[in-house]
Image (cartoon, rainbow, N blue to C red):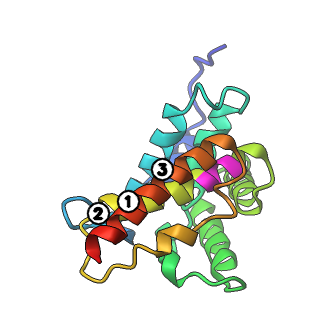
Amino acid sequence: MTNDQPIDPSRLAAILAFVQAAEKLKDTLRSGITASGRAESTAEHSWRLCLMAMLFDRELAGYDRLKLLRLCIVHDLGEAISGDVPATCQRPGDDRAARERADLQSLCAPLPGDLAREILDLWDEYGAAATPEAQMVKGLDKLETMLQHLIGRNAPGFDYRFNLSYGAQHTGRHPLLAQMRGLVDAATRERIAELE
């Protein structure tokens, strides 16, 4: 069913203010390098993660596919404020998650309460890997990063061995993820052998 009624002007203004603030994600650079040799943005990473979730629609038939896409869109949104922490620099127990959530709350401040809650709830769900959809997106997120490492024009000395252990706890939870992980690990080993 569609709603053809005009949106409340203040709600519309609040949503557009949020969309404008979220544009910062386009300029939030990650440590991943594109095939052309430039730093990728968090927005580009999130876009490709959405693409992956969409392309495996048939294999993920038992999942809430709209939720998968929403989780993909929201998972790194807080990085628009304080930036990305490279995967190689992340440590268990660091305050990164708390800072990113606080940044996301700040980013969501212009939104109507229902939308701000929805975004924060999705972010929390992703962070806790609390549902099959969140677990799937976590796994796809790690695999997207690893794929970028393989296609990127990385600096000499890039440690491809990092891929072999990165995100292992998230990429074995579903046969699709495990199968993809096997292919990515094989490609990583080939790259390492080429460089030795």
135 horizontally vs 96: left or right: right
Circle 3 SS class: helix
Instruction: Tell me the quarter of the image containing the N terminus.
Output: top right
Q: Residue at x 57, y 81 (%)?
A: 90
Report the magenta residues as a range.
Answer: 135-139
Mark 3–mark 2 Cα distance, whole angstroms, equals 17 Å
Q: Which mark is residue 152?
A: 2
At label 2, the amino acid type is: Gly
Q: Residue under circle 1? A: 148
Q: Earlier in the sequence, mark 3 or mark 2?
A: 2
Mark 3–mark 1 Cα distance, whole angstroms, equals 14 Å
Q: Could you tell me if residue 80 is visible in this image?
A: yes
Q: Residue at x 48, y 68 (%)?
A: 163
Structural crowding at the residue carrying mark 2, measured as other residues with C-alpha within 10 Å and reported as few (<14), some (14–19) or many (≥20):
some
Answer whether residue 178 is magenta in the image.
no
Task: Look at discs 3 and 2 and give the one toward the viewer.
Answer: 3
Instruction: Check the image and report above or below for 44 versus 51.
Output: below
Q: Residue under circle 3? A: 183
